[in-house]
Image: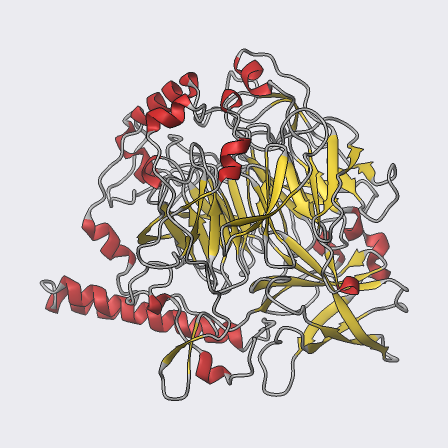
Amino acid sequence: MKRLFLSIVSRFPIITILFLSLQWVTSSTAIGGVSGGEKGEWQILLNNTGVVAMHMALTHHNTVLIFDQTGSGRSGYQLRRGYDGKRCFDSSDDSRVSSCYAHSVEYNIAGNKVRPLRLETDTWCSSGSFLSNGTLLQTGGYGNGYRRIRYFRPCDGDNCDWRQSRALLSDNRWYASNHILPEKDRVIVVGGRRIFTYEFVPKLSSGARSFDLPFLHQTNDGNEGGNNLYPFLHLSSDGNLFIFANRDSILFNYKRNKVIKTFPRIPGEGSRNYPSTGSSVILPLDHTDGFQKVEVMVCGGAASGAYRAARQGNFLKGLSSCGRMVITGNRHKWAMENMPEPRMLNDMLILPNGHVLIINGAKNGCAGWNNAANPSLRPYLYKPKKIPGRRFSVLKSTKIARMYHSSAVLLPDGRVLVAGGNPNNRYTFNNVAYPTELRLQAFVPHYMGRDYHDRRPGNVSIHYGKGEYGVRYGEEFTVNFWLGTRPSNDVEFSAYAPPFTTHSVSMNQRMLRLRCKNMVREEDGWMNAVLEAPPSPNVAPSGYYMLTVVNGGIPNLQKRNKRQPISPFFTNSSGVSLVSSETTMYATEMVSTSRFSYQRLRNEGGLDKEEDLEGRAFGRTRSWTRLRKMASRKRSKIRIPGLRRFLRRKARMFSTVRVSLGRVLKRLKDSQSHMGDLFAGNYLFMQVSPSPLKFIEKSVMGQNLHGFSSSYSVGRIA
C-alpha cells in the first residue's frame, strides 16, 4: 500500500547472507561478477532509497536503518496513506508532509529493498548506540526532537518500527555523540550545539541531571560554528573514555566526573570536529598484549577559518594529515602522516582484515548547507601495520558525490554500503551544484574477488560448552570452518562491533583480534579452532559482534555473534530482583551543571548571529500535524483478523481493553521471536557469573530502565 515517489530503475545482484544460518555462500554469483582487482569495485544497488542517509546503522537482523531529518519537506518516498490515516495526494500543501512522506526506511540486504518507518520527532543531526540486546538507542535531534529518546528493536518481519520513550534527556542534544558503557547497558551522551555537558541514558537516578564538562567549553570556537560538535568518543581498555574535540583530547573518568589525562594537541592548523568535520577510529585491539594497548587515529578536517570563508562562498582546502596516538601507558605523542589528498566529511571504517577504509567526503570547505566543494571520489585504504609512507593506497573512484549528510557502514558480507549526500536544506534535484543523492551503492573491496576463493574460509560455525548458549568473558569456545587449501601462517579471528554512523562519526565502532589457543586441520579440509573470549566488558562492551575468520588477509563472509554480561538486574530461583555484583559506584560529588541562558550562550560564541537567524527561519517553515490518539492505538492493535473483527463488534466501547490485549499478544509474539533467535545458535552469550540461563532471563524494559512503562517490554537474554 505504499509506493516510491521516484521510481527505482534497476537493481543489481548482491550478496545474500542470513545472520541466523551460520552458512557461507560459495556461489560465484554471490559476488556480483566482481573480478577482485586491488582497487575494488562499485555497485549500484538502488536508484532511490527514498530518504537521505544522514544516519545509518547495521542491525543484527541483516537490515540497515537509514534515516534523515523529518523537517526536510517532501522526501523521495511518498506514502499512499499518511500516518494520520488520511489518503495522501500530490499537493502544494505542506501541512501533511510529515505524515505523507517517509523520513526513515529499513533496507533489507538480502532482498535489496526498503520499507518505510515512522519517526514521530525530528532526528536532524542526532546520535545513537546499540544496546546489548541489539536495540538501537537513538537520542536527540532538532526542535521537537531536542530531548527525545527513541528505540528501534529490529525483527525478522515488517512489524518493527520506531518507538519513542516517555523519558526525556536533561539537555537539548543536537550534534551530540553517544557511546555504550561497560556497565548496565548504560549509554553516555556528550555535547551538542551550545551544550557543554554530558548525561547518561538511563539516568543514574530518577532525579539525575546532566553534568558539566569544562573541556567542551575550552574547545568551543564560537566564530567557527563550534568546531567541537560531534566529539570523537572511544572507550579505553581501562574503562575510561577518550574524548577528542576540535584539536584537543582527554581521558575522562565519567564515573567520577574527573579528567585523568590531558593529551598533547594534535599538530597542525585547522580543526577536526564539526563543522570542520574529520573522522576517527580506534585501531583494532589485540589479544597479544591483553587488549591493553589502545591507539586512536584521526584523519582529515577543515582549515582554520573554513567555516566563515565557506559562508562567503570561499572554500578553503581541507586537511590531508592523519594522527595516531597510543592513549594507554605514559608516553603520548601524535605520530603524523599524510593522506594522498586533502579530505573532510570522510567516513572511516575498519574492514574485516584490520585495514581502515577512508571513504566519502570533499576536498574543500567544511560541513553545512552548501559549505563544501570538490568531492572526494576515490576511497583510500590504510594499512596500520605497514611502515610509514607505505600505508596509504588509492582505490577505484566512484562517479557519485558523497559529501554533507552522507554515510557508510560495513556489511556482513564484507562490502561497504554507501548512501546519502544532501548539502541542500530540502530535497532538491535540479539547478543546484550538488543535488540530493538517493542512490544506494556498495563498494566491493578487493578481498571479495574470485581470485581469492581458494584462500577464503567458509561454512563458519560456533560451538559453545555443554548446556551453554554462548560464551562468557574470558572463557573458551570453538569455531569450525572449511578451508580448501592449507591455512597460511597468518590466520586471525576478529570480532567487530558495527557502529551507528552519522556526520563522519562511527559511534561505538570497535574491532578485536581474538586469541586462538589451538587449531587443528582435518583431512577433508575442516578446521577446528579453540578461541578465547575477551576478558571484560571494558574491552568488549556487551552487544552483537560479527565474528570473522581471516586467512592471509582474506576474510570469510561474516557472522554476527553476541557477547553479553549479566544484565543490571537478574532473578534468583525465588524470583526476587537483585542488583548485580557488577554494580558501578558513581561518585556522590557529581552535581548537576548550572543552567546557562540562551542569550549568554550566544554571547559566548556558542551560536553566531547568521546561524541563529537561519535556524529560527527554518523552524518557522515547519508545519506539524497533531497526530490523533487513535494513531498510537493503531500501532498496537491486534494482528489476528478474526479477533480484531470480534472486538470491533463486541467491545467497541472498551478501547483500553482492546489496546491492552494487543500489547499482550505483541509481547507474546516478541518473546517467541526472541527464543527463536536464542536457539538458532546465533549468539556469543558472555556472562560474568555462571548463573543458569533460566534464572537470569528477565525483561530490562519491565524495570523502566530506559523509560518505557512495564506494559512494553523489549525481549532480551540475561
**Left or right: 4 as drawn, with respect to 632:** right
**Left or right: 598 as drawn, with respect to 231:** left
Residue 45 in view, yes or no: no
Residue 598 higher or lower than 456, as above or below: above
Q: Residue at x 57, y 79 (%)?
A: 469
Q: Quadrant of residue 690?
A: bottom right
**Who is closer to the viewer here, 382 or 480?**
382
Where's residue 66, x and y in %? 50, 45
**Who is closer to the viewer here, 71 or 690?**
690
Residue 705 higher or lower than 170, as above or below: below
Where's residue 481, x and y in %? 76, 72
Q: Residue at x 78, y 71 (%)?
A: 516
Q: Quadrant of residue 425?
A: top left
**Who is closer to the viewer here, 709 or 118?**
709
Where's residue 40, x and y in %? 77, 42
- Colouring method of the image: secondary structure
Residue 211 in view, yes or no: yes
